[in-house]
Structure formats: C-alpha cells, structure tokens
Image: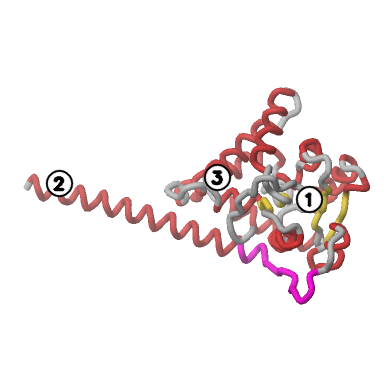
Amino acid sequence: MGQEYSAPRPGTKLRVIGAGLPRTGTASFTKALSMLLDGPVYHTGTQSTLGPEREVKTLIEMLRLIKTDIDPADRAKALALMKGQLDGYAAVTDAPYCSLAPELLELYPDAIVICTTRDVDGWTRSMSGIASTATQGFLRFSLYLLPSMRWFPDYIDALIVYYGVLTGLPTPEAWARHVEKLKRSVPPEKLFFYDVRDGWEPLCNILGVEVPEGVEFPRINDGKALDAFAKKQIRTGLLRWVVVFGSVAAAVGAAVMARG
C-alpha cells in the first residue's frame, strides 16, 4: 500500500489510470507518479484505510452498484461516485480502480492507462499471502473501534462480491484475464505496460516528461508496508478493546464495592 493519505487538489486533472493489480509495485508507482505529475495520486489501499471514513464507505457503495450492468441507473450512480472521489487527483492506482479502466475512461477520456507488471509466479505467491491475512474473521472485532478501519472487513467483502479479488484472483489465469480485458477494452494508443523495476526512463517516456536528474526512483516494498500496517492496526484495535474491557470491569467493581 502507499505511505500516507493524499488529499485532492481542486482543479487537478486525472491523467493516468493505474491498471496494475495489487502487489505489482503500486506503492512505488504511486509515489513516482506524484513526483512526475506534480499532483496527488489516489492509491486506493491507502486512501481507504488512512483517509476519512467517507473514502472506504464510498468504495463499498460504488462496488455494490457497479457489480452488475443490468441496471443502468445503478451504473450511473457508481460512475458519479467514482468522479466525486477522484476529481482533484492526477492519477489513480490499486484495486478496485485497476479493474475499472473502461469506466474511468468514460469519465476521463483524455487519460492514459498504465498497467504495472511483474513476474506472474511471484505475484501469485504474494497475493495468496495477502488473501489469507485479509479474510481472517477476527479482523471485524479487532478493527471495530478504529475509524475507517472498522469498515475494512465490509470493504473486503465488497471486493470479493465484485470480482473475487482476494479469493479467486491470485492465479496465473486471473492475471491473463486481467491483461486480456485491458487489451480488449482500452484503445491500444492509450494502453501501456510498465515494470517498476525498470525505473524512471520507460515511465517518463510514456508520460512524455524528462527523467528527474539526481532523483532516485522510489522503491517501496508493497508487501512489507502492508504487513507492517496490518500488524499495527490490529495491535492498536486490540489495545483499545483492552481499555474498554478494563474500564467496564473497573466500573462494575466500583459499583459492587459501593453497594457493599
């Protein structure tokens, strides 16, 4: 995931739709884009967990509406939610927006689509690890007292209902389907593939900007960042429950003593 919540900048035009699946260097990609585009980037994993509750609640509602194309009214509402969430950002990355490139191009027709890539076997192993962590049942209890994070289990449920991002996604076949969908639904002149291990030059070529002189390409380990964040949030949540239970126990004890 990314490093910190990014607030929108009014008037900023969305120029890049990040279509890379989670664990393809999206945190490094996000940081690099924010530097090259000189604007805030919406990294969905970070915004949904470190931002105000409206971020994750909007994503849950959007996923509920966009999961089917049967009702045009629901789809229109979903697109309106997307626009309300992404206006003011120079780019968007991470799930679920990485799988909504066609819809985002409807809203931002001048944007380009960049899909971050990596070796498929490594991606499959990495995603399988996050799947087992994110779906553990105790998360709902341990995170309940934390703003924004209390909605995280519902957000995971919405992702699973939408396209099985944490249960059915981590397979080579799913990777191939994602790439094929992009090639089928995005105009070829707007679609680019990029590996963050290649650094500045290919990304700058795609964007048509100069390579930053003397600036090291950001290297953020998505897996380590996510693991550290998850452990910190669970620990904080459980400590808050300890305080709650301790306060209740103290109150009960005081009441008993007062009666005695």
Q: Is mark 2 on a helix, strand or loop?
A: helix
Residue 124 visible, this angle: no
Is 241 placed left or right of 73 in the picture?
Answer: left
Where in the figure is residue 233, as x and y percent of width and height? Answer: 49, 57
In this picture, is 61 found above or below 131?
above
Residue behind mark 1? 16
Q: What type is the residue that disc 1 sits on? A: Val
Residue behind mark 3? 153
Scheme by which the image is coloured: secondary structure
Q: What element carries label 1?
A: strand
Is 257 placed left or right of 172 in the picture?
Answer: left
| Quadrant of res 122 | bottom right
Q: Residue 176 carries which label?
A: none
Residue behind mark 2? 255
Query: Could you tell me which residue is drawn at 85 percent across and 45 percent down?
Result: 182
- Residue sticking out furthest to the front: 11
